[in-house]
Image: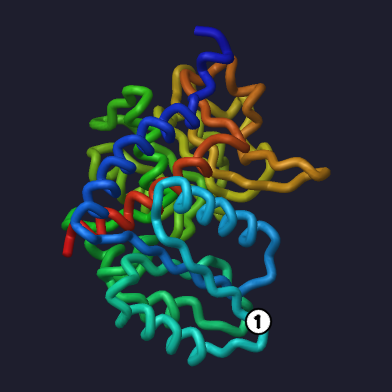
Amino acid sequence: MTNEEKIIDVKKIVEERKETLKSKIDTLKAKNIFPKLCVIVANNEEASRSYVKNKRKVCEELGIIYEDYFLKENVTNDDILKLISSLNNDNSVHGILVQLPLFKHLNENVILEKISEKKDVDGLTINNLGKLFISNNYILPCTPKGIISILESVGETFEGKHAVIVGRSNIVGKPIAQLLLNKNCTVTICHSKTKQLEKYTKDADILVVAAGIPHMITRDMVKENSTIIDVGINRVNGKIIGDVDTESVLSVAKFVTKVPGGVGLTTVLSLAENIIELIEKE
């Protein structure tokens, strides 16, 4: 297998999933159900605005109604809670997403918990995360859902495999660890306090890296024929690079996702899929 063949074609995966999703959306529209997503943005980060732009683009392409709320820095917790309450009670709205991070003075946990479980398109409320923990009819957080779709697309088997996760965030690290555990992997979670990181990464059949450190994973830190999923988004000298030094690990790994053009593409599509799933659960 050439190095080029080892780089997973995530764009192809996404396009195939889009066709399935479009069919579901057309079926809903034939029943006079018009999927609608509302996104709340309470930060000034350029990256967040870029993500929101991508979400709008995909929704418009698929025929999902999209609405966003860009809030000023003087917004209060109560302001956002009132907005979410209004959207919770609006029957035309099927999904609510609060773009993270928030302005520092806002309480992320309180705000996320205000979202109705039935409209929690990001799968980050305590109820949905709890359901993930007990494998019970859950809505998957978007990035972990995308990661699983990538692994399945390359024919990755899970049972008995050693999966190592670098990063323990509530958005990626913890939920993907639980998902892989649910699929009968043996899971190790590494983080900033882990000593001798390479000891664990070199033993990983499946390595998911979401630490936010540019090119922290190099050739000497990965196992032969492993599958590496790079979730890192880092801006260095005007370029976006991942947490994995892709070029160096290609000589060792079986499959690798690249940055940009990798996991991020599946995250936005997973969001759209979750909206339809929430409708179907009603």
Q: Percent from the top left, x then y, of residue 273?
A: 33, 49
Which corner quadrant of the image does residue 275 belong to? bottom left
Establish if 162 lies above or below 55.
above
Q: Residue at x 44, y 29 (%)?
A: 203
Residue labelled with disc 1: 72
Q: Percent from the top left, x then y, of residue 216?
A: 65, 39
Quadrant (top left, top right, bottom left, bottom right) of the C terminus:
bottom left
Q: Percent from the top left, x then y, of residue 281?
A: 18, 60
- Nearer-the-camera pick, 119 or 199: 119
Q: Percent from the top left, x then y, of residue 244?
A: 61, 35
Establish if 139 lies above or below 196.
below
Seen in the image, is 252 located left or right of residue 27? right
Q: Work out which residue is located at the far right of the displayed protein and give it.
A: 237
Q: Residue at x 56, y 83 (%)?
A: 106
- Colouring scheme applied when the structure was drawn: rainbow
- Nearer-the-camera pick, 124 or 29: 29
